[in-house]
Amino acid sequence: MKIPLLDLKTQYESIKDEIENVLKDVIKKQAFVLGNEVRSLEDEIAHFSQARYGIGVASGTDALFLSLKALGIERGDEVITTPFTFIATAEVISYLNAKPVFVDIDRKTYNIDPSLIESKITKRTKAIMPVHLYGQCADMDAISEIAKKNGLKVIEDCAQSIGATYKGRKAGSLGDLAAFSFFPSKNLGGFGDGGMVVTNDKALAEKIKVLRVHGSTKRYYHDVVGYNSRLDNLQAAVLRVKLKFLQGWIEKRQQNAAYYNEMLSGVSVITPFVPEYNTHTYHQYVLASESRDDLLKYINSKGIESRVYYPIPLHLQKCYSDLGYRKGDLPISEWAAANTLAVPVYSELKKMEVEAVAGCIKDFLK
């Protein structure tokens, strides 16, 4: 049985007519950059995330970068974040000639461990950037308390967590700024790159609006040196259609995850841990096994696509060798990189396919 890690074709077929109608409408109007669809999506994502303002940008990476830029992060500053994430999280800090300071993760949730943050704060620390990894929030009350105590800003990396909740509050409403990604593989994915910043701070929202259009508040008048980071109207139109279905898709992912948990109970593999205060949206369903590499090969050999997110933590990446980290410095992140793998959990996955994946895992580990 062939089971992909993600099946976007099936998702598309379920909403094909509505998608094609909105794309035709945008093409007919010939308004392709920013525009009404973008403005409507900004309002809708902000509302969905319990934030006041949304600013559409060209990618999730740009959403992170422009958030840092709006906060005034600059050369010599330090930003605390996790090493167990996609490189964009740290990369944007480097873009500004600031320094990423990596803090190890919690072994159960794979999110940054708040108890380790304070020891890494220096006089150069300006912000904390937690990642809500795989679809569930980091412990934001603990992080926010540390930030407030030390006069730091908090940027949520929500690339994988749209729709997740923490103590009843939505991802994106928990920090000073939050960055979403609409990369096609995300739970809310477009037909290319796209991103959004959300915030409750009007002044920060206005800064990002200026930065995304070459530093301009009026055409051909440039108050600051800015960037070209505008969300396309075509992408916004697609995302507005998909947003109407997002909560249902999340619930189906949660059902698939619950069935995996049931099927894999008692098997020598670690299933996702969700604290009682979180709801998990399962952008990825991630297992841990000491036999990870052999399990991965076995699953793939049976036609089931599985993948490792992420095989090398950022503190051990070649591009960050100048920071001086060594193997063993952040042991939980290193353990996770060596022992975790993701299996299919997308909303269109059939019950018999969940059973097939779980059965394959059980066959290998028995």
Image (tube, helix red, strand yellow):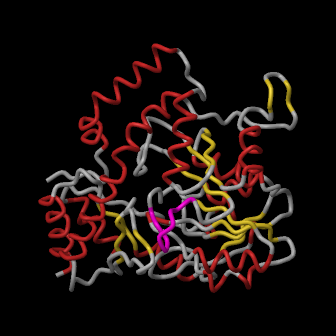
Question: Is residue 168 a member of the stretch shown in magenta?
Answer: yes
| Number of marks drawn | 0
Question: x, y (%) of residue 107?
Answer: 48, 82
- Would you identify the image quadrant in which residue 318 lies? bottom right
For the point 18% across and 63% down, the residue is: 354
Is 290 above or below relative to 228? Answer: below
Residues rendered magenta in the picture:
164-172
Residue 253 located left or right of residue 201:
left
Nearer the observer, 194 or 250: 250
- Would you identify the image quadrant in which residue 352 lies? bottom left
For the point 57% across and 48% down, the residue is: 60
Nearer the observer, 171 or 288: 171
Question: x, y (%) of residue 156?
Answer: 61, 62
Residue 347 located left or right of residue 88:
left
Nearer the observer, 185 or 203: 203
Q: Quadrant of the C terminus?
A: bottom left
For the point 60% across and 40% down, the residue is: 56
Is 271 above or below relative to 158? Answer: below
Residue 212 located left or right of residue 293:
right
For the point 84% across and 56% down, the residue is: 74
